[in-house]
Image (cartoon, rainbow, N blue to C red):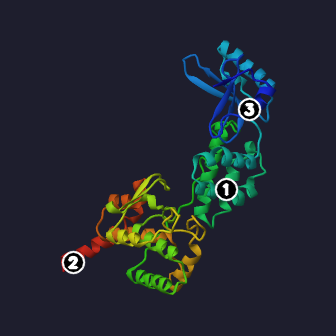
Amino acid sequence: MATGKITSRSVARFKGEPGKESCLWDTEVKGFGLRVQPSGRRSYIYKFRTPDGRRRNRKLGDEAALTAEAARRAVKVWVVNRAEGKPILNAKPSVQSITLRKLCDLYIEDYAKLHKKPKSVEEDTRYIERDIKPLLGAKALSDISSKDIVKLKGSFSDTPVKANRVLALLSKMFNLAEEWEYRKVGNNPTRHIRKFKEEPRQRFLKPAELKRLEEVIEDAEVNEWTSQPVIDAIRVLQMTGARLREVLNMQWDYLDLANGQIHLPDSKTGRKTLFLSNKAKRYIDDIKPKPDNPYVFPGQRQGSQLINIQKPWRLIRERAQLNDVRLHDLRHTYASLAVAQNLSLPIVGKLLGHKSSKSTERYAHLYTDVMAAAAKKVGG
């Protein structure tokens, strides 16, 4: 724990520990400190106990916007108020005025990059730069009302899924704005705005379509108009129901073929185990590792992995006359085949690696077809 009198000079010298939250605590005013977050954000804080013994932490302001001397004067007022039994919030500085553009930048640096996966950060950044900043970025955070959010939502009425994602992102950012004291608590402008109704897209390949797809993949393999790692990745997607990124990130060390399992250290839902059919085990076992490459599906450069297989996939699906089929629909097809074999929804969810049963419920309607087919057999 670093200690010393907080001055402009000591604040400038204190860098904190890389990747960790660090504090420089003042030796004169107990509880007064400079906090450096893992992102590099620096702010003056005051830690104290309430009369009933609870710990509290109040932020005075960012180091860039407040001098050490001004922060010391402000915290001394708080100390006096606390000694006199007055609510500490009475001396709290007024909410800082920043634009939504600035909040977006703070959200990415101080929250998303620290708590979300890289792909999610990439998606959030895309929504922010393309959709949020152009429409509301220049507006002061304190001036944004529910009417502004409704107007923004309405501009995406033709793309309801996108509108809902933007709305959810704004909701999180405004919650953080309250937590970071950039906006008054309890007036998130997204709170009572309804999301658009979403119709989940479910595309399952029928037997005839699966046959066409395999014929085209075989042709690509024989005539080598698509690389073997791409073909292997697509087939493993079909046979495991895994997500695309889970397959492309797969390394040889993750495989436990003796037990028919692939242990993924990370995925959309955290650590995950893929369970392999005998067909999948045999297929993966026949893939020849590339020297000095840890990835099951290697890229062209030494030691690299496949990054993007959308272009060859578009060519394959076009030749198979499946232009509306996405790679993710292979996962839906795997689930539909599992249902057709009378596996229960919880088992299907386990095979797919769903964290919540709600994610698996989208396949519940498939059991209607299974039961109807069974009834026909029973009835003769």
Say which amino acid is labelled 1.
Thr
Is residue 370 depicted above or below 62 in this figure? below
Q: Quadrant of residue 279?
A: bottom left
> In terms of depth relative to the viewer, which is nearer, 43 or 237?
237
Q: Residue at x 63, y 64 (%)?
A: 157
As measured in the structure, the alpha-carbon distance from the residue carrying label 3 to the one carrying label 1 is: 26 Å
Question: Of the numbered discs in the image, which one, if any, rests on residue 125?
Answer: 1
Is residue 129 depicted above or below 181 in this figure? below
Question: Of the numbered discs in the image, which one, if any, rests on residue 61?
Answer: 3
- In this rendering, the label closer to the viewer, 2 or 1: 1
> Where residue 150 sits: x, y (%)?
66, 55
Q: Quadrant of residue 260?
A: bottom left
Q: Tell me the quarter of the image containing the C terminus.
A: bottom left
Q: Tell me the quarter of the image containing the N terminus.
A: top right
> Where residue 198 sits: x, y (%)?
53, 63
Say which amino acid is labelled 3.
Gly
C-beta proximity under 8 Å, tags 3 and 2: no
Q: Which residue is mark 2?
A: 377
Q: Quadrant of residue 58?
A: top right
The single residue placed furthest to the top in the displayed view is 84
> In terms of depth relative to the viewer, which is nearer, 357 or 232?
232
